[in-house]
Amino acid sequence: MENKIIHKFILVGVIAGITALLDFLGVVAFPIGIFGVSAFYIGAAFFAGFAIWYGWKSLIAIYLGLLIGALISGTFTVFAFILAWGNVIAVIPLLVLFNSKRLKLKPELKKPRDYLAYILSATVLQSVISAFWVLGGLYLFGILPGEALKIAIYGWIIGDMMVSLVIGIPLLKLVTPIVKKTSFYQN
């Protein structure tokens, strides 16, 4: 019992660290020219994988990692506590679909229905939900001007969709079999 708790803390710490690094890289390496917005946010693909592989506990880790990433990238504000939820909430449809015993989806994306579920949840829903939550929040808080909102939303969604397809699909296909062999994988 004690070992399982330690494993969960280690897992949350590792995912939070990876998320912080990916958040930093996304914002600093691929800026879209709007405060804290990335044109190619690599983390989106990994958030999907973390949610599928590790379940609900990964959401806490992703949230903590986003806060740390915002801090080290210089985009941290008091609003980061609210805005970080945009990326967390965005992976919930994916988590629900791939955890459904009834749907029997395979994270290794073996059948067309696995791909369809991934594309609908991780590519479309994750991109749209996170873009509107975070950018809408930045707009409402007065950080993002109205003139930039439309281009920022398009840039965010298109960038996240590219990441989801180009990085996310190979990541799931190649890494899922390895993760499944560990005690950390959620059954």
Image (cartoon, helix red, strand yellow):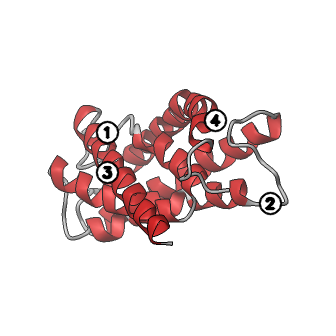
Q: Which residue corresponds to mark 2?
A: 101
Quadrant of residue 173 within the rendered picture: top right
Question: Considering only order in the chain, which callout, 4 or 1, is on the residue closer to the N terminus?
Answer: 1
Mark 4 and mark 3: span between their CA atoms? Answer: 45 Å
User: Any mark on residue 147, and which?
Assistant: 3
| Labels 1 and 3: the sequence-earlier one | 1
Contact flag, marks 2 and 4 (Cβ < 8 Å):
no
Left or right? Give the position of 25 relative to 59.
left
| Residue type at tag 1 | Gly
Crowding at mark 3 (Cα within 10 Å: few <14, some 14-19, many 20+) = few
Q: CA distance from mark 1 to mark 3?
A: 23 Å
- Identify the residue position indicated by label 1 in the image: 26
Mark 3, mark 2: which one is toward the viewer? 2
| Amino acid type indicated by mark 4 | Pro
Q: How far across and down, in percent of the image, does residue 136 sit?
A: 39, 62
Q: Earlier in the sequence, mark 3 or mark 2?
A: 2
Q: Amino acid at mark 3?
A: Glu
CA separation in Å, label 1 and label 2: 34 Å
Percent from the top left, x then y, of residue 129? 52, 58
On the image, the x and y values in percent for residue 33 come to 24, 39
Mark sitting on residue 177: 4
Query: Would you say the residues marked 1 and 2 are in contact, meaning their CB atoms lie under 8 Å apart?
Result: no
Q: Which badge, 2 or 4, is on the more N-terminal residue?
A: 2
Q: Secondary structure at mark 1?
A: helix
Q: CA distance from mark 2 to mark 4?
A: 19 Å
* Left or right of residue 142, residue 102 in this image: right
Foreground residue among 64 and 31: 64
